[in-house]
Amino acid sequence: MTDVSIHIDFDIVSCVIHFLQMDDNADVQLQAARAITNITLSNTSDHISSVVEAGAIPILIRQLSSPNEEISATVAWALGNIAANRLEYRDMMLADGALPALLQAVEDFKEKSKHTVLRFPHEDVNEQAVLIIGNTVVNDLIERDGFYLPTEDFNELSKVETVKKVLYAISIFFALLPFPDIDVVQSVFPVLARLLLSEDLEIIENACLALCHISYGSEIYIRSIVASDRSIIPRFIELLEHGSPEVTETVLTIIGNIMTGDNLYTKMILHCNGLPALFRLLDHTSESIRDAVCLAISNITAGTTK
């Protein structure tokens, strides 16, 4: 029997959910949020069902608005894991207002400068910094590996983690079929369009992934992506030449799906210099990217008269 199963057998889940509601003790809440997330990470239906049946979903949604960013990030991660397990759970979350709460959790996120998403001298420090937040009394300046970090930057790094986990949950919501109603889907576009402009790789990847899931929908969903923000097609074209192959391939999929819609959408992509960007990718080292580019160019030549 696993440790998680033991906890469930002894009804630890109900106790943990009780601790998650102790708004006067953020440390206890954080540990409770981590415990719930660990259970959902087991990806075992019985374990996740125990969390849902104990009434965790509305409480997790409420904690998205916690002033403690690490709590917000952790419960967003748990919600995404639960939604991924069963369509019924995703629909329960939507009915309980999870999507507006997720969007609100990242509403005030703004990268202060191109250096806001902190780049540390050693990759392992990035992961350690997240663990430090909330567990250490941070002085006005902390020196780590020769890199000075103001307190406000630690807070910003914590917010970045919240954004990543929220985007993960949103992408899960739209990975499941059938899609939510179009009105629900449209509510995410302003946030996703803004986060596409981030300089954090994981934020861009997750925003693209969410839009990619939506782009597999019917014509009305594709039209909603195109009409959501006038900068979104030009940004897709820019991201074709992003340094991350994962971003490039995901955006290629989005563009390919968009071009299956109205011929006007293909013309918009061409107007934004999409064809030269696609041609430049023909020399990409990734075979799957080259194949996707060839398919996109084929669709363009087949679907337009110019």
Image (cartoon, grey):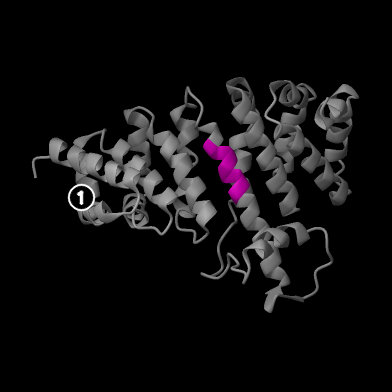
Q: Please, is residue 40 above or below residue 163 in the view?
A: above
Helix, strand or loop for disc 1: helix
| Residue ID at (23%, 34%) | 262
Q: Position of residue 113 (x, y in %)?
A: 53, 70
Quarter containing the C terminus: top left
Quarter containing the N terminus: top right
- Write down the residue under mark 1: 270
Q: Is residue 256 left or right of residue 87?
A: left
Q: Position of residue 85 (x, y in %)?
A: 62, 26
Q: Please, is residue 239 above or below residue 253 in the view?
A: below
Give the dominant element type of the magenta stretch: helix, strand or loop: helix
Q: Please give the range of residues in magenta.
A: 164-171
Examine the image and state in which quarter residue 212 appears: top left
Q: Position of residue 140 (x, y in %)?
A: 77, 76
| Residue ID at (45%, 37%) | 186
Q: Is residue 178 magenta?
A: no
Q: Is residue 76 left or right of residue 268?
A: right
Q: How many marks?
A: 1
Q: Is residue 269 left or right of residue 198?
A: left
Q: Please, is residue 132 above or below residue 91 in the view?
A: below
Q: Report whether residue 191 is seen.
A: no
Examine the image and state in which quarter residue 169 appears: top right
Looking at the picture, tell me which residue is in the foreground, 212 or 284.
Answer: 284
Q: Report whether residue 242 is seen.
A: yes
Q: Please, is residue 192 above or below residue 3 in the view?
A: below
Q: Position of residue 284 (x, y in %)?
A: 31, 54
Q: Residues within 10 Å of mark 1 (few under 14, many from 20)?
A: some
| Residue ID at (57%, 42%) | 168
| Residue ID at (71%, 53%) | 69
The residue most toward the left is 305
Amino acid, disc 1: Leu
Examine the image and state in which quarter residue 75 appears: top right
